[in-house]
Amino acid sequence: MRNAKETFMRGVFFAAACTSVLAVALICIFLFTNGIPAINEIGAASFLLGEKWKPSNDIYGIFPMILGSIYVTAGAIVIGVPIGLLTAVFMARFCPKPIYKPLKAATELLAGIPSIVYGFFGLVVLVPFIRDNFDGNGSSMLTASLLLGIMILPTIIGVSESAIRTVPESYYEGALALGATHERSIFWVVLPAAKSGIIAGIVLGIGRAIGETMAVMMVAGNQARMPAGIFKGVRTMTTNIVIEMGYAAGLHREALIATAVVLFVFILIINLSVSLLNRRNLNGGN
């Protein structure tokens, strides 16, 4: 009877794993079977490096959207990674017990807020702030980077804190025994030991930043043109798809799916790079 239950549960776990793999496979098939023909028809160079996106004239160049996605994500990394990492270090090693619980609850609450709420916050708070204190109308690359920097915080904080807490206490105690201070032990011994987990958290944050749509669409300006500065509007690949998919047809629709293919490849490259980096660190550690 016990063996039958174990066999049944093993089958349930296997079916769940197969479902995940099947979902990824179906998404890949849909994207590539619809997107690759469009890229071939438009021309790979014209599609990827073209600086104009004019569907009414059958001109489909997504280079401005690629740059927009890269710039906005880079801005979010510059803002979100230092804040998230230092917050994780504080929560794991410096935070007094009475403060930890409300701080942990606050960071977890950030992760649960819908992106549309973040977008509304950016629209009514960040956009007027940027407009009143800097150049431009407020809907800009800087505003989108600020908002995304806030949105990736809970991911970076949660994963990095867990990674820091998994470092054996003997590392910290050994550094103290050698004469290092509390701060030096954490920043020169504990943090390097938790590097793989911290990098994983940062990559997850980058994945959220580059894939975010609604919040960015509400604050980025969404002009389909080459980025002209941090106070000017930009359009990312995700917002390009959402804005035009509702009325697109024919080659226009296929070009939008091809944009999703490029976005998918971006995410794939990021994940593969991190996997290779972690493997190299693991081999170096051994």
Image (spheres, rainbow, N blue to C red):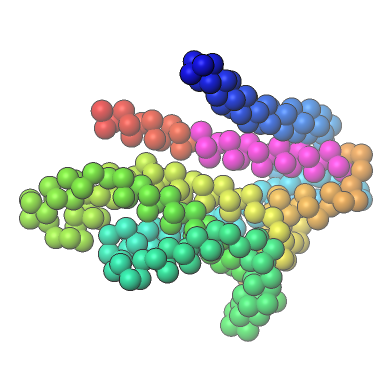
Instruction: Please tell me in which quadrant of the rendered image residue 132 appears.
Output: bottom right
Residue 19 or residue 203, whichever sits in front: 19
Would you place residue 270 above or below residue 41 in this image?
below
Q: Residue at x 48, y 67 (%)?
A: 106
Residue 246, percent across and down? Answer: 87, 51
> For the C terminus, which image quadrant?
top left
Look at the image and tell me whether residue 77 can be seen. Answer: no
Residue 23, percent across and down? Answer: 68, 31
Q: Residue at x 23, y 55 (%)?
A: 186
Residue 238 or residue 49, whichever sits in front: 238
Would you place residue 26 above or below residue 243 in this image?
above
Q: Is residue 286 left or right of residue 105?
A: left
Span highlighted in magenta in the image? 252-272
Q: Is residue 23 left or right of residue 103?
A: right
Residue 87, percent across and down? Answer: 38, 63
- Asked whether 264 falls inside the magenta stretch, the response is yes
Residue furthest to the bottom in view is 132
